[in-house]
């Protein structure tokens, strides 16, 4: 991976310094996933005209809080005055929606478009910037993913980004329903806004 030149001054230190902090916050397997997401996000960013720095940073921090204990998230929900109904959900929602607060306080990244992309990377939203769409898809189609239909949706993400967001949301919702697990309301909002 070539060094991303963080010219926009969103992150005060180097990419190497950020990688060190991120690697320390997660397992080696999770860190490898993060690097694959960054690779895919950069490819999508080039295709869709989004600055490489934004795509790189959003991808690198997207799972920063994924392996944190539940108590950390519950404390942040209380301390930051976040929607109290968030307490009813688990890590799959928390690591993005609540984890963005940890990225702000611990890594010093305050760029709202990056933080929103992180908040939306698992549940989506009715309104998503190109960066949010890119992270949402890069996490889903990084080259380590092998689910049925992955090649189809990878190609779609480079042909019609919005349609690929709808594809992912529809398939994720179908998976959750088949597993008989509760569906986060934000996922339903995303489905209604982006389904094709």
Image (cartoon, rainbow, N blue to C red):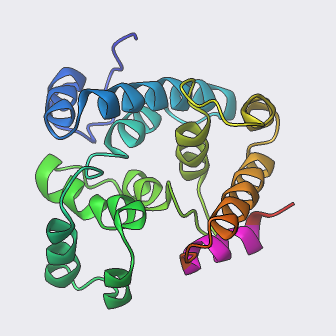
Q: Nearer the viewer, residue 71 or 1?
A: 71
192 relative to 158, above or below: below
Q: Residue furthest top?
A: 2
Q: Residue at x 63, y 33 (%)?
A: 49
x, y percent for residue 21 = 14, 34
x, y percent for residue 150 = 72, 34
Q: Please provide the residue range marked out in magenta.
A: 185-193
x, y percent for residue 19 = 22, 27
127 relative to 154, above or below: below
Is 49 displayed left or right of 33 in the figure?
A: right
Q: Main secondary structure of the magenta part?
A: helix
Q: Name which quarter of the figure residue 178 lies in.
A: bottom right
Q: Residue at x 31, y 89 (%)?
A: 84
Is 49 displayed left or right of 8 in the figure?
A: right
x, y percent for residue 6 = 31, 28
Q: Name which quarter of the figure residue 30 lies in.
A: top left
């Amino acid at each position: 991976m070539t060094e991303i030149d963080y010219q926009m001054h969103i992150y005060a230190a180097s990419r190497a310094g950020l990688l060190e902090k991120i690697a320390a916050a997660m397992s080696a397997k999770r860190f490898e996933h993060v690097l694959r997401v960054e690779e895919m996000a950069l490819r999508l960013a080039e295709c869709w005209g989004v600055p490489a720095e934004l795509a790189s940073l959003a991808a690198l921090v997207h799972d920063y809080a994924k392996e944190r204990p539940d108590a950390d998230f519950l404390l942040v929900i209380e301390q930051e005055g976040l929607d109290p109904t968030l307490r009813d959900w688990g890590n799959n929602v928390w690591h993005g929606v609540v984890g963005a607060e940890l990225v702000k306080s611990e890594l010093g990244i305050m760029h709202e478009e990056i933080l929103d992309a992180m908040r939306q990377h698992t549940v989506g939203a009715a309104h998503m910037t190109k960066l949010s769409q890119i992270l949402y898809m890069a996490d889903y189609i990084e080259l380590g993913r092998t689910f049925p239909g992955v090649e189809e949706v990878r190609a779609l993400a480079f042909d019609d980004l919005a349609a690929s967001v709808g594809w992912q949301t529809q398939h994720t919702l179908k998976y959750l329903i088949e597993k008989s697990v509760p569906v986060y309301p934000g996922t339903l909002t995303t489905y209604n806004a982006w389904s094709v």
